Image (cartoon, rainbow, N blue to C red):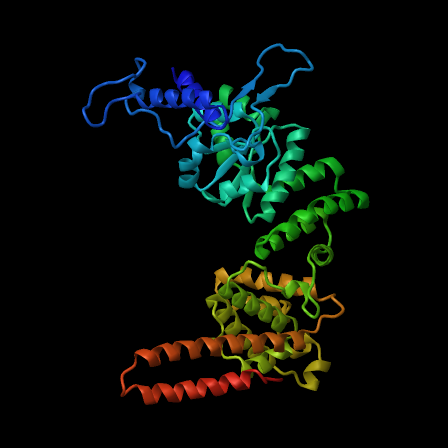
Amino acid sequence: EFFAVYLLNFCSFVGLGREDKHKTVISMALGLLISGIGMDTVSGTLRMTFGSSDLLRGINFLVAVIGLAGRVFGEHRPDAPKYINSPETALYTKSRVLYGLDRGKDTIRKENIAVLVEGYTDVILSHQMGVRNVVATSGTALTEEHLLLLRRFTDRLAFAFDADAGGDAATRRAVDLALAGGFHISVVVLPDEKDPADLALEHPAAWRAAIEQREDMFPFFLRRAQKIAGANSAEGKKAIAADLLPIIAKVRDQVVAGEYAQQLASALHIDPRFIYGELKRLSTLAAPRREGVPASSAPHATASPLQLHIQREERLLALLLADPDLIPKAAELLPETALEGPQSRTLYTALKTWYSRERAQPRSPEDSSSTPAERGTAVETRTPLARLGDILPADLRRSLELLAFMVEVEREREEWNPAREALTLIRELLLTSRRRDLRQLTEQLRAASAAERPHLLQEITAVAADLARAERVEW
């Protein structure tokens, strides 16, 4: 009965989409027939239910049948297609439709992750076994339209494509596209090289466990690359780096990108600076640069004004870390209140404190010429960067590592001038901060009483003067 109802619904859409008036009348009659299914909500009398209590509530017209699909089971001709779909129409285009999303969207939103598979049967069997946040690309490659659909419900994807060479290639293509869309990616590792449908049918608990134990995408691809190319030879290391560096370059979160770069350097047993240098080269080739603006400092086109401001703050902190002699000069020009991000303010304060401590321990010529044993003092072997980490809260040490990563990426750039770029950023931060203060004071002035106005006018005059000075600030 359910198939008959869906077929009638599908016929209705076909009739309404044609110019033949007779078909349109027939489809309308079928639509009226479908609307008579269930219980009358006014009188409570039973209408057509086909003997099923599930149809008492009628048919949910929010879910529309826009196409049909079939799969060949058992023996079939070698030249016969495995899947048969409706021809593409204005309503049905595989590149814009995710199979199972209508039934799985609520679970995806609740669990904040979507499991992406290839075929219809993967979704059907998974849903039957109680795993409902699974959707399929209907045998086609993942597209930007698919990602836009998924973005409505989650920004986390787990890929569970077939465990064969074609599945690996499809996963890699999909990951590249999803990374460009800003998704957080993981991979479901299927045991015994099984397909999702086979695993869900034969071992439902193993299918659930595979999803729960999904793996971050970079270790997955790193392990596969090491298995294929090997990491014991120079050629193998070169092949692995060439395969994985584009993945790191596509990651928007720079902290995550830095972690992946460290993992790759550790797996290849090479200095991380070589990885950072290659990433810098890739980013230079991939991103068009505006004249006079370094590629690494150009903000993302879709960033909000607050995000742009915080990006400038982080960039300035990286420049100060690269050239510590700029720290006291910046401290004279830029107050902490000009920084919007709480982490940026904490790191800025820590940099100034660290610089003062480092410079407060001068060494005399006698100390310089004598050995540590002669002076009877312990040797400080830890780096200045490590000592800076000591005065930071634990949750900000990763931010410090990110700044160090940015410095390493930029240090070899020939045209890089930290002092000039830092001064430009200080000027922009000061102007943004003073304009914000001026707007706030102006709004207060509009709502102020007569007694409060003189004081506010004095503050506005002072801020306007600071704004004029900020436009001409120099070292």
Q: Which of 71 and 374 is in front in this view?
A: 71
Which quarter of the figure has residue 55? top left
The image shows residue 186, relative to residue 423, as above or below, that is above
Q: Is 424 displayed left or right of 344 in the figure?
A: right
The image shows residue 198, relative to residue 189, as above or below, that is above
**Residue 163 appears anywhere in the view:** yes
The residue sitting at 39% across, 23% down in the picture is: 28
How far from the left and from the top, in percent, is residue 309? 52, 68
The image shows residue 343, relative to residue 39, as above or below, that is below
Q: Which of 134 and 248 is in front in this view?
A: 134
The residue sitting at 37% across, 23% down in the picture is: 31
How far from the left and from the top, in percent, is residue 76? 63, 11
Q: Is 54 displayed left or right of 200 in the figure?
A: left
Which quarter of the figure has residue 54? top left
So how many labels did they put on this image?
0
Q: Is 422 displayed left or right of 3 in the figure?
A: right
Query: Residue extending furthest front?
Result: 21
**Residue 218 appears anywhere in the view:** no
Q: Nearer the viewer, residue 462 or 418?
A: 462
The N terminus lies in which quarter of the figure? top left
How far from the left and from the top, in percent, is residue 232? 77, 42
The C terminus lies in which quarter of the figure? bottom right
Query: Residue extending furthest left?
Result: 43
Q: Nearer the viewer, residue 48 or 162?
A: 48
The residue sitting at 46% across, 27% down in the picture is: 16
